[in-house]
Amino acid sequence: MNCMQQDIREVLLTEEQLRTKIREIGQQVSKDYDGKDLMLVGILKGSVPFMADLLKEITIPCTMDFMAVSSYGNSSKTSGIVRILKDLDFEIEGKHVLIVEDIIDSGTTLAYLIEYLKGRKPASLEIACLLSKPERRAVEINARYMGFVVPDYFLVGYGLDYAEKYRNLPYIGILKEEVYQ
Ligand code: IMP
Ligand code: MG
């Protein structure tokens, strides 16, 4: 057993569960955006594994770009402040933009990003989010594609971090409380 696995209380979503769900989302996106100019916008860094796997399940032409925002610092609770660390490389005017995000927690990050990107006049703006923690929602967010509704535990793996670690776990696990308390 390696040191990362020792910090995991329980595996919440296995690699197989993630793969199956992401395949479904990819097929649905491919249907919904057929014939449209689709651009995936990943939110760094948590969305990277989801983005990589979703991209491969999409069978229509699409482009991709990334933004980096910060709201957390090195703590396990949100600060409520969103800062843009890296903006888009491409224009989105007239494009069908699908934001790819790891998790909706309070909703602060996505609420901010939606308002910010709307100002650039995309043809449409939707969200594909792998996980949602509805218990913690402070701002209402409508994600067109949602992988799994999860309970209010601090989760790591498959892109999700605690203090920038654990992103490389291939599954999503519940972090032991003693690790972050
Ligand atoms: P929100 O703005 O509160 O919705 O927070 C969204 C961001 O918080 C996500 O993109 C994640 O980076 C981070 N986050 C929320 N919950 C967790 C978690 O359980 N583990 C790791 N990161 C989380
Ligand atoms: Mg994060």
Image (cartoon, helix red, strand yellow):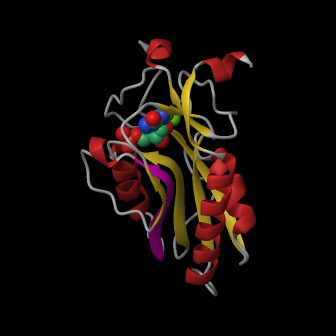
Residue 21, image x and y in percent?
Answer: 60, 61
Percent position of residue 35, x then y? 64, 87
Q: Is residue 61 magenta?
A: no
> In which quadrant of the rendered view does residue 157 lie?
top right
Please name the predominant secondary structure of the magenta segment in the image: strand
Q: Nearer the viewer, residue 124 or 133?
A: 133
Q: For this view, does 19 lie left or right of residue 172?
A: right
Which corner quadrant of the image does residue 5 belong to?
top right
Q: Is residue 159 visible?
A: no
Specify whether residue 149 is in view: yes
Outermost residue on the left side: it is 138
Q: Is residue 104 above or below residue 159?
A: below
Residue at 34%, 52% (x, y): give it: 111
Residue at the image point whose x is 45% and y is 68% from the top? 125
Give the residue drawn at x 44%, y 59%.
117
Residue at 58% from the left image edge and 76% from the top image edge: 28
Residue 130 forms part of the magenta stretch: yes
| Residue 162 drawn above or below residue 100 | above
Residue bounds of the magenta highlight: 123-132
Q: What x and y, as percent, mark residue 130?
A: 52, 53
Q: Nearer the viewer, residue 150 or 108?
A: 150
State the count of labels: 0
Write down which quadrant ligand 1 falls in.
top left
In the rendered image, residue 113, in percent from the top left (x then y), is placed at: 41, 52
100 in relation to 46, above or below: below
Q: Quadrant of residue 76?
A: top left
Q: Is 12 located above or below residue 35 in the figure? A: above
